[in-house]
Amino acid sequence: QVHLVESGGGLVQPGGSLRLSCAASGSAFNMNAMGWDRQAPGKQRELVAIINTVGNTNYLDSVKGRFSISIDNDKNTVYLQMNRLKPEDTAVYYCRFWGGSSGWGQGTQVTVSS
C-alpha cells in the first residue's frame, strides 16, 4: 500500500489562502495521477482536484478559479494551492493516489472561519 502524508491544513479567515502538500512513498508503485478529496461534516466525500503525471488537471466546479493543483514527479508530491477560501471549503482534505497501488491519506483539516 502506498503511504501518503498530507500537511498544510489549518484555520484561515474567509478570503485567505492555504497550501496543502502530499508526499507519496513506497518504492513498489507507479504513479499515474494524484489529487485531493474533501469531506465536510454531514456530507459525502467529493473529488476536489486531480492532476496526472503530464500535468493535465480537472477541478470541482465550485473551486475552479480559486484552487490550483500541481505535481512534482521527482518528489512524488502533489500540492493544492487554495485561494479566496470560503466557509463552505471547510472539510477534511484527503490526498489521493492512482497507480500500481491506489488509496487515500489520513487527511488534513481545513477550517475557514472568521
Image (cartoon, rainbow, N blue to C red):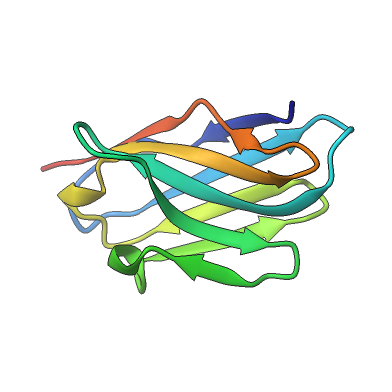
Task: Work out which quarter of the rendered image holds the C terminus and state it.
Answer: top left
User: Which residue occupies 21% across, 58% down?
Assistant: 15
Q: Is residue 11 visible?
A: no
**39 lies left or right of 6:** left
**60 lies left or right of 96:** left
Question: Residue 96 location, x and y as percent?
Answer: 57, 42
User: Which residue occupies 65% across, 43% down?
Assistant: 97
Question: Residue 63 location, x and y as percent?
Answer: 33, 64
Task: Work out which quarter of the rendered image holds the N terminus and state it.
Answer: top right
User: Which residue occupies 83% across, 52% down?
Assistant: 74
Residue at the farthest right position: 28
Nearest the eye: 36 or 113: 36
- When the figure is inspected, residue 66 is found, relative to residue 114, above or below; the finding is below
Q: Is residue 29 visible?
A: yes
Q: Quadrant of residue 105?
A: top right
Nearest the eye: 12 or 38: 38
Nearest the eye: 39 or 86: 39
Question: Residue 18 location, x and y as percent?
Answer: 39, 49
- When the figure is inspected, residue 78 is found, relative to residue 7, above or below; the finding is below
User: How many numbered badges does the structure rendering display?
Assistant: 0
Question: Residue 111 location, x and y as percent?
Answer: 25, 37
**43 lies left or right of 61:** left
User: Which residue occupies 19% across, 50% down?
Assistant: 88
Nearest the eye: 19 or 26: 26
Residue at the farthest left position: 114
